[in-house]
Image: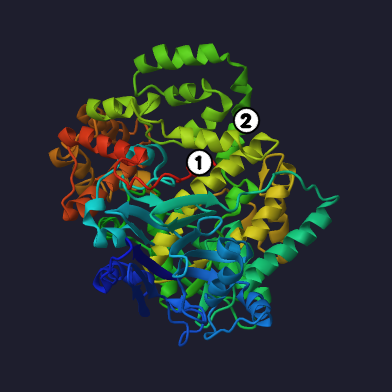
Amino acid sequence: MCGIAGIVGQPGETIDSAAIRRMCQTLIPRGPDDEGIHVHDDVGLGIRRLSIIDIAGGHQPIHNEDQTVWLVVNGEIYNYLELRKELEGRGHRFYTQTDSEVIVHLYEEKGSDCVQKLRGMFAFALYDHRRRSLLLVRDRLGKKPLHYAICDDRLLFGSEIKALLAAAPQLAQVSPEALLQYFYFGYIPDPLTAFARVEKLPPGYLLEYADGRLKTRRYWDLPAYGTCNPSSEEECLEELEQRLAEAVRIRLMSDVPLGALLSGGVDSSLVVALMARASSAPVKTFSIGFADQEFNEAMYARAVAERFGTDHHELVVEPKIEETLEFLTCTMEEPFGDSSMVPTYYVCQTARRQVKVALSGDGGDELFAGYDRYAVHLHRQKFDRIPQWMGRHFRRHIYPRLPSSLRGRRFAFNVSLPSRDRYLDSVAHLPVFDRERSLFSQELLSWADDCEEPAQRFQGYFDRAPAPDELSRLLYVDTKTYLPGDILTKVDRMSMANSLEVRCPLLDHLFVEWVAGLHASWKSQRGNRKYILKKLAERVGVPAKVLHRRKQGFAMPLAGWWRNELRNEMLELIVEPRTLQRGYFNPPAIRGLLSEHLRGRRDRSYDLWLLLVFELWHRNFLEPRGLSPNASSIAALGNISRAAADGKIRPAARSEVACPLKS
């Protein structure tokens, strides 16, 4: 795992190697082992390396035989040995033993279509000196991040936004549109970032930049859902086991110590079971627990470790939550509201003390319908009988007059919506439009009324999902949004903060394609979530008490913390004048929300968490860079954001950009 960065300037320009080095210095946690820089005239590529394969000889940037093609890559290519053999058979000469080198030789043969042959997790930048072109590519599911921006007729890219800001501080212009997304979903989905002029390359996309012109195109998408219906459960299990076992096996390649993150849930337990089968030595497993038994899964992880004879390491976490949040919000470039980032950070920290690579069970819920919200949504389809005109009347004229403390108010709003929007509302937290409008300032609402509603991006995914049934459409939407925007972002940021590489066998793209094709009845059956995956876990020996229990997830005891550990300084921070004077919120409404929670009238713990993380991001990431928007500057920020979206602050030559969400 690594961190990459670079600049492509104008013809005749000379890129300063010191600028590339400054970009790389922001990425040291991603790559503490080595640094590499290639600068030639108007192009500069840089990398910080976490050495996993070919530790001694795998120095990057990597080049081809005549040094006309140069590459920096973050990630792992799991099928590199077979690709290397094929390429050598066609006359290509390799000078390292690293997996990364196959990319430059594939590019020589196939150009940008080289990505179609790669099986792995990756974000890479490849510069072709002959064609004077840059190719940026992000893996199919979005395991590894990649950001880019046009600034002063240069293209800048980096694994983290911090790298771009190190070379071009003027890019640090906050995007209100992205902040609306954060309030809605707790994260900022691609292609937006918290900064108006910086974008995320979406998963499954590539970008080509040449002659000052930038083009993006999608090279992969999920296939049609529900096209495969095995003739028997045994047939389905046989193929499921074979495919997942292979996905696990190829992820065991490493020249450094390797282990597994074991939460005690179905997915990570199944991965550990298959690792144990494929390994000659005991698998190193790592888990954490909480003193609060309602949130403690350590006993289940322990049962799995005992069953498969792993070398198990367990840490009971009593987090210094204030210190941890201070640290994490200093490193995060965007507000990120998933509270499970805290235990994820700690389990990665625990694992990194002994290993450099760990496998995880991420992706199982999106593939096999593991979330409670899927069952809730399907149950609420009975409300489709409500006429749409009646729902609109309720939301416009009745809902705004209901007291915010009224129980059932949010439920009534939700069931009044059409089916698609009902699901999107159920995964939204503090939507600026409609339901939570009273929380926000008039300045922000005035700007938001002229802006695209955040849910529109998600509606587009729902409407064009290649799926014949409602459940499969939900899985498609979450795989395109929540999985890369929240789950994989959390795993990447928290693991990289500890210089740990995390691999996700369940998100092997060939495995994902096959599972997507399975009929929905194999994933959810009579309310039994993850039906066929649990059957496989049972088959390979995962203890029954792990399989047949209430799903917890990597949850945090937020409600209790707000009434105890976080009550004083953290609560005061949310209603401090410094916070409320920023101009985003309506102060009486924020105080009322806090009062509701503390008096036990309603559990507002997650809403308060979103607000706390947002404010800490302001203080710990924005303010040190001289950025602290307030009420008087929100309109100006909105103008900047709209100008960026319209292309008015980008080079005129940027005329061929394809909108990722419309292609």
Residue closer to the observer: 16 or 641 = 16
Q: Amino acid at mark 2?
A: His
Q: Residues within 10 Å of mark 2 (few under 14, many from 20)?
A: few
Residue 101 disc label: none
Q: Amino acid at mark 1?
A: Leu
Q: Is residue 117 left or right of residue 24?
A: right
Residue closer to the observer: 19 or 4 = 19
Q: Residue at x 22, y 32 (%)?
A: 635
Q: Is residue 291 visible?
A: no
In the image, residue 130 sits, relative to residue 607, either above or below, namely: below
- SS at badge 1: loop
- SS at badge 2: helix
In the image, residue 313 sits, relative to residue 479, either above or below, namely: below
Q: Which residue is mark 1?
A: 661
Q: Which residue is mark 2?
A: 379
Q: Is residue 37 left or right of residue 100?
A: left
Q: Is residue 223 left or right of residue 125?
A: right
